[in-house]
Amino acid sequence: MTLPPHPGLAEGPVYLDYNATTPVDPRVAEAMAPHLTRFFGNPSSSHPYAAEPRRALADARAQVAALIGGQPEEVVFTGSGSEADLLALRGAVLASGRPHPHVITQATEHPAVLETCRALQRLHGARITVLSVDRTGLVAPADLAEALTDGTVLVSVMAANNETGALQPVTELAALAHARGALFHCDAAQAVGKIPLDVQALGADLLTVVGHKMYAPKGAAALYVRDGVRLEPVVYGGGQEHGLRAGTENVALAVALGAAAELAAAELADGAAARLAALRDDLHRRLTAALPGRVHLNGPEKGRLPNTLNVSIGGVLGHELLAAVLEIVASTGSACHSGAHTPSPVLTAMGLGADRALGAIRLSLGRWTTQTEVETAATLLVAAAAGR
């Protein structure tokens, strides 16, 4: 499927940072626009102005549910993926009623999960186990089986890593959690819309969906909550979102998320994942051919997101390489604190040394990435790295 140029990308550098955020699809913006102006009513009201917002909310819930294989009533709209993770983790722990509930997660989770776990430990006496990962970033199911206890109330393991694209063995991990009576939460922010996901097949009781990773605006997200799962609300008040998140609904953003979900489902059916994987692999081949022996893949060769390429180039620092190539926008494997760069916690958790981690760049492709852009990016990166 060929799309017209995106107005936000047409004049700028080559955008290879889709895992950080995606541009809003104009079709998504078009779908939400009437709910910023014409359809302004409160969906909880009983008068005629509420009818269209109420219908739009229901439709959006159904669109999100269809993408992930759930039911509309199992979709709770939230304001961000971090909030959805908070609702899942805090909600499950507090609803368990146990004095010292046990939660298991893993070392390369998003900070929204890891920091929530630390807060639950500090504020609510939860016991937290953080599983290690192997050199490709994967959790060993045997490690989870060993860590599970009769007191475990929740296991939280992401579907795909935002830096390396590594796909965790979620189905097997969820089955192990259920066998010990624990719930399973999956932060699928990076995976939803990029690969087919079905909550029934995965065995997820709770699953996080994030709009700005799939061409909807920032501020649009959702948590799938399997029917029958009890959670403590994240916001108390008027009972919206099944009583889990009070406050008048942001109908426009819900509509945007629903439209994005419907577009993602259509693209997946049309082979979008294979197209992105082919572009990603071509970019990798061009880099390795031009810089023999210097390009090292971070993460699994197979079993990763089709759009994600994380590589370290020997002899260069990632942030210096990208700073030298202003015609490309991408991310590095380091974080800058007061002018000093530190290695990515994800890459160090995988056992990579500081030099390898500091040399990493993440090149993530998306809906508007073209073959010409891949060729341009490879040429510019090779030229910048060759002189170092």
Image (cartoon, rainbow, N blue to C red):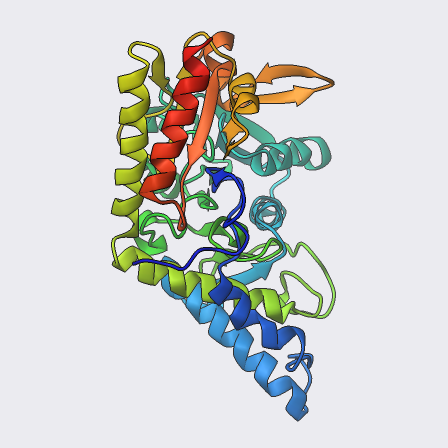
Percent position (x, y) of residue 337? 70, 20
Percent position (x, y) of residue 87? 60, 50
Residue drawn 27% across and 32% down?
A: 282
- 14 relative to 24, above or below: above
- 374 relative to 291, above or below: below
Residue drawn 44% across and 63% down?
A: 64
Percent position (x, y) of residue 100? 62, 35
Which of the 4 quarters of the picture holds residue 35? bottom right
Percent position (x, y) of residue 16? 46, 37
| 260, 101: nearer the viewer | 260
| 145, 15: nearer the viewer | 15
Residue drawn 69% across and 79% down?
A: 42
Q: Is residue 336 visible?
A: yes
- 295 relative to 224, above or below: above
User: In what quadrant of the picture does the N terminus appear?
Assistant: bottom left
| 82, 378: nearer the viewer | 378
Q: Is residue 350 visible?
A: no
- The tally of labels here is 0
- 41 relative to 116, above or below: below
Which of the 4 quarters of the picture holds residue 191? top left
